[in-house]
Image (tube, rainbow, N blue to C red):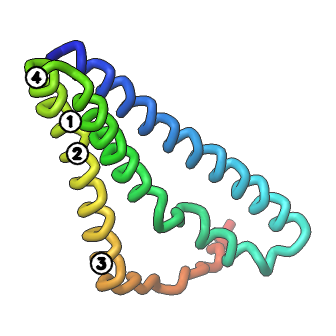
Amino acid sequence: MPDIIIPIALFGAFVLVSAQVARLFSNISLNRTLREALRSDPSSVPTLAERLDARQPWADALIGWIFIALAAGIVLTSLFEDPDERRQMLQASIIPLLIGIVVIFYVRWAKAEAANAQPPSRPAPRIRPKSRKAS
């Protein structure tokens, strides 16, 4: 059984690290665009700033679907094994299946929560005049 769990864990780590690296490069590109906009057209900065931490709606769900596909691959591969190994592989396929389902349900729940949440209102910044000390 551990000989199946270790590759699943390595695959999961690879998927998660790849997703974070892709997000990092996306944010680097957007930050570069934001700096160039600050120099050339400062009026477009608020629109770009809103996109700074915005993610594609499918980005997190894709990770869940990848884990579900891994589970399906393990199940299909187990069909060609002897009964004892098949049972172990089917048991091992439950782990990525559950991870994928939990990720997809979390993404849907978070999307519903974000839709129900109202953006917090920010008070206008106060600019205080500098006080002059009497000498």
Please state which of residues 82 and 108 is positioned toward the viewer in this rendering: 82
Residue 97, labelled with which disc? Answer: 2
Left or right, residue 68 beside residue 128: left
Mark sitting on residue 50: none
Taking 49 as reference, is 87 above or below it? Answer: above
On the image, numbered disc 3 is attached to which residue? Answer: 112
Residue 100 in the image: above or below residue 52: above
Name the residue located 47 percent from the left edge and 63 percent from the top edge: 58
**Residues at discs 2 and 1 in contact (Cβ within 8 Å):** yes
Mark 4 nearby-residue class (10 Å; few <14, some 14–19, many ≥20): few
Nearer-N-terminus badge (4/1): 4
Query: Residue at 86% across / 74% down in the picture?
Result: 41
**Count of numbered marks:** 4
Q: Could you tell which of marks 2 and 4 lies nearer the N-terminus?
A: 4
Label 3, label 4: how many angstroms apart (C-alpha)? 43 Å
Sequence-wise, the earlier of marks 3 and 1 is 1
Please determine whether, in this image, residue 1 is positioned above or below residue 104. above
Q: Tell me the kind of residue under disc 1.
A: Ser
In 3D space, how far apart are the residues under numbered discs 2 and 4 (Cα atoms)? 21 Å
Badge number at residue 83: 4
In the rendered image, residue 64, in percent from the top left (x then y), is placed at 34, 51
Going by the numbered disc 4, the residue's amino acid type is: Pro
Depth order, front residue of 84/95: 84
The percent coordinates of residue 52 (x first, y second) are 60, 63
Discs 3/2, front: 2
The spot of residue 116 in percent (x, y) is 30, 85
Secondary structure of residue under mark 1: helix
Q: Provide residue 63's location: percent of width, then percent of height.
A: 40, 49
Mark 3 → mark 2, Cα distance in angstroms: 23 Å
